[in-house]
Image (spheres, rainbow, N blue to C red):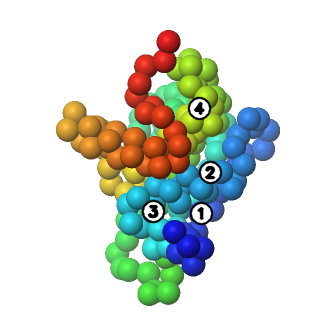
Amino acid sequence: MNSSEASLVDVHIAEGLVDIPDRAVLNQWVELALDALDRAGKVSVSLSVVDEEESRRLNREYRDQDRPTNVLSFPMEFDAAPPPDEPLLLGDIAICGPVVAREAREQRKSAEDHWAHIVTHGVLHLAGFDHEDDADAEVMEQLEKKILARGGVADPYIARD
């Protein structure tokens, strides 16, 4: 992918969070996922790293689950296409930094690899993939593995001892 094809990735990180990948790394994983979907340069994405309180609020408001979660994706719905010279806003991703850190420790994964997986997972949700049934989950997992392998990350679904 050349720089003229780069998508617009708007990254926000809540104050006070620690051990969060820098914006360039988060951007890189969004771009890698978009490139695999042939959407690089055609869309923009907003990615926010939030604390547990904000994640819990969003999860409660949009999914009726009163707990923080690792990632929430909010695909945009449009009535009309954007002007031809502007990328389409694919949607917003909210990642809970503390939940991702905790999961990485519990699953015995490197924090960097788990962040890559969660960002990729969020982008795929924006693009319309889900895991509501076994067949859809298999499609999404295979695509995640392919994208992550392109970035040098091992299969996130292999159990760690």
Q: CA distance from mark 3 to mark 4?
A: 24 Å
SS of the residue under disc 2: helix
In this orientation, which residue lies closer to the viewer: 43 or 55? 43
Q: Nearer the viewer, mark 2 or mark 3?
A: 3
**As drawn, is 92 to the left or to the right of 22?**
left
Residue beneath label 3, please? Answer: 35
Q: Say whether disc 1 or disc 2 marks the residue closer to the N-terminus.
A: 1
Q: Are marks 2 and 3 in contact (CB under 8 Å)?
A: no
Question: Residue sitting at 53 percent across and 60 percent down?
Answer: 31
Q: Residue furthest right?
A: 16
Q: Position of residue 39 (x, y in %)?
A: 42, 67
Task: Tell me if I can see residue 40 in this picture.
Answer: yes
Report the amino acid beneath label 4: Val
Q: CA distance from mark 1 to mark 2?
A: 9 Å
Residue beneath label 4, please? Answer: 100
**As drawn, is 50 to the left or to the right of 65?**
right
Where on the picture, by quarter, is residue 56? Answer: top right
SS of the residue under disc 3: helix
Report the amino acid beneath label 1: Val
In this orientation, which residue lies closer to the viewer: 39 or 56? 39
